[in-house]
Every structure is written in structure tokens, then in C-alpha cells.
Amino acid sequence: MRLQATLFGRGGMHGLDDKAHAVRKAMFIDLMAPARIERLGELFKEAWRAAASRWGTTR
């Protein structure tokens, strides 16, 4: 329990078994699909561009 509380957090995937683990793993695998990763990159670029446009105007 002490290791779980410090390294992985309570309720994390590391502590799941059976169906709960399979469901969480399937969700993670879906997020790692190439199209999902590409979309994440697009969102990241949009967020950086929006932030960068504000940097020059704030002091």
C-alpha cells in the first residue's frame, strides 16, 4: 500500500484487475491511435499559438 500511494496513486491502472483493467487499457490504446495522436498535436499547436499571441501584448 505504501508503494502504491507514493509511486502510482490510489485508483491508478496499476492497481486494477480483470475487467476494470481491460476497460482502462482499451481506453488508453484507443488514445494512442495515430489519428488521435495527430489530433493531440494539432490541439497542442493551437494552444501554443494562442498563448504566444498573448505574450507580446501582456506586460
Image: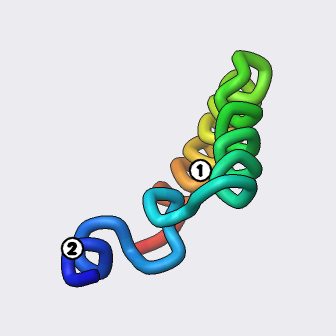
* Quarter of the picture holding the N terminus: bottom left
Which residue is denoted by mark 1 in the rendering?
53
Q: Is residue 16 left or right of residue 15?
A: right
Q: Is residue 58 at least partly visible in the picture? A: yes
**Label drawn at residue 1:** none
Q: Is residue 17 left or right of residue 29?
A: left
Q: Residues within 10 Å of mark 2 (few under 14, many from 20)?
A: few
The relative height of residue 49 versus residue 2 in the rendered view (above or below) is above
Q: Secondary structure at mark 2?
A: helix
Q: Is residue 42 at least partly visible in the picture? A: no
x and y percent of residue 9 in the render? 39, 75
Q: Quadrant of residue 8?
A: bottom left
**Label drawn at residue 3:** 2
Q: CA distance from mark 2 to mark 1?
A: 43 Å
53 and 47: which is toward the camera: 47
Q: Amino acid at mark 2?
A: Leu
34 and 57: which is toward the camera: 34
Q: Quadrant of residue 4?
A: bottom left
The relative height of residue 39 versus residue 59 in the rendered view (above or below) is above
